[in-house]
Image (cartoon, rainbow, N blue to C red):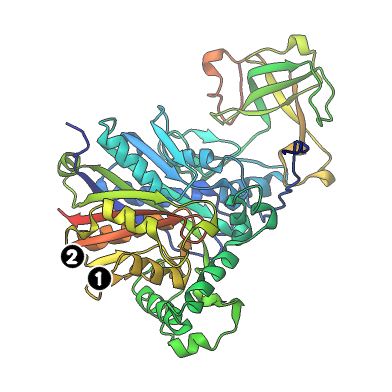
Amino acid sequence: MAGLSTQIAIVAYHQSDCVAHAGAANEVELIMPQLRAVFDQVGLANAQDVDFVCSGSCDYLQGAAFAFVAGVDALGAVPPIRESHVEMDAAWALYEAVLKIRMGHARSALVYGFGKSSTGELPTVLSQQLDPYYLAPLWVDTVSLAAMQARLLLDRQLITERDMAAVVSRSRKNAMANPHAQLSGEISVDELLEAESLVAPLRKSDCSPVADGAAAVIICTVEQARQWRVPYALISGIDHRIETHNLGMRDLTDSVSTRQSACSAGYRDGPLDVAELYAPFSHQEIILSRALSLDAGTCINPSGGVLAGNLMMASGLARIGEVFNRVVTGEARRGLAHATSGPCLQHNLVAVLESA
Amino acid sequence: MSQETDLITDIEAPVYLSYNFTAGRAPTRFLTQVKKGVLTGQRCPDCANVYIPPRGSCPACGVATQEEVVLPDKATVQSFTIVSIPIPNNPIQPPFVIANLVLDGANIAFIHLLSECENEQVHIGQRVQAVWKPEQEWDYALDNIRYFKPINETDVPVAMIGRVPVAGWEG
């Protein structure tokens, strides 16, 4: 019987490589291989074998109206299926799917996200998500906003540029074990600090690279997971909070919405072995880990995080997938996945995953 | 003391975003062929339906379509409408006919224009053929075909529309 207490499991995850330019591939061609991979992990034919499908994407990224509708061509939607879409990162599509299952309207769901950001100028495209009267006409891009946030942290001596470079250095090192990463390798803090600034005080390495690609997840009730006879991780909690549009009203050196979401998702109910944080800029990883008071017992961004490759509209879902992978393989018993949306960490989602 | 201010009815906030848009791998292959005057569909490995123009997947089965099938330029009218009102910015003057056409050897219709016909005589099952622009004008576009025109072949019964073999219709 479904209800608010229904236990929900993640049973499959796959993401594409993060590539700077996916060439001629359209949305269907980006999505289809990831869907095939998750269907194969569970032994399903296509989207007819799940009760619900939800995707996350933003047509502004590739500049194609109704690209998200065209994406349905990847599903096998004949006869018609129950499908929904969020104009957000697919982590929020997963949230919608969780609600759908808890309401008893589905037992299983396919969730996917995709983005082809290389066709446009991503930081400028994202300026159009700002308040339409005061900010969007100024064309304030996401990198500039993040730079102002970093300046606040540096000026208040909450961080140093060396701290930021240390985040990047660890990201690149961890990404060496991530076959889908775009940027990886051994690079020291000193080497990183030698580079000129891009948008001061940010260096290019402090900003996540723009990548094309897609990711997919299958979730279901625990009963369904057992019936499918596949390994699974439990979503023990999930919640999200959004902060005001007005950047002047926010404390940009903290992430209150992340902390609230995490508390509501019950992240303090046990030790966290791993945390995958969606921090598109190096200083934001520090904000997030401090907002959550993560200590040395939690391995942060073992995948390298999005500084190693950022699939807009799929990276949040991929954070959940990365924690899922580690819980299912036994590498971690309990982990936290975080997704963000909007400028300077405006909107945040936290999911807590546990071994079954 | 409140002072009456002018009501702001609009503000100017233009949006300019430039993109290097790509059609997709499958559409790119199709458009490259159509520039040479060749119509190329793709067959679904599961249900065997042939799609033209292809998008790279069978939307019914949700699988990638790889096998390419060269199709002739003869087709059957699956449905049509006679447009009697001018459409803004459309250079074609009404009345004109828009039809859902299925090429021989294909299973799914695409939309194109019908001309060189009595509009009132157009009917479902009617056989038509492409009228191409001169070869030197061919581009990466489906309007390399100006329109389709009726040909003197027996009508295709409704049940057979979308099932005509690539070799053509013998009635």
Question: Residue B83, position in %: x, y?
Answer: 75, 18
Residue at the far front in the pictured view: B1
Q: Work out which quarter of the rendered image holds the N terminus of chain A and state it.
A: top left
Q: Is residue B66 visible?
A: no
Question: Residue A73, position in %: x, y?
Answer: 48, 39
Name the quadrant containing residue A340: bottom left
Position of B75 with respect to A270 (left or right) is: right
The residue that appears at 69% across and 57% down in the rendered structure is A138
Note whether B123 is above or below A243 in the view shown.
above
Identify residue type, mark 2.
Answer: Pro
**Nearer to us in this view, B141 or A301:** A301
Mark 2 or mark 1: whose residue is earlier in sequence = 2
Secondary-structure class at tag 2: loop
Q: Are marks 2 and 1 in contact (CB under 8 Å)?
A: yes
Identify residue type, mark 1.
Answer: Thr
Name the quadrant containing residue B147: top right
Q: Which mark is residue A298?
A: 1
Position of A258 with respect to A269 (left or right) is: right
Question: Residue A116, position in %: x, y?
Answer: 54, 55
Note whether B76 is above or below A9 in the view shown.
above
The subunit letter for the residue under badge 2 reads A
- Mark 2 = which residue? A271
Q: Which mark is residue A28?
A: none
Secondary-structure class at tag 1: loop
Position of A292 with respect to B80 (left or right) is: left
Q: Is residue B96 visible?
A: yes
Name the quadrant containing residue A176: bottom left
Q: CA distance from mark 2 to mark 1?
A: 8 Å
Position of A61 with respect to B115 (left or right) is: left
The subunit letter for the residue under badge 1 reads A
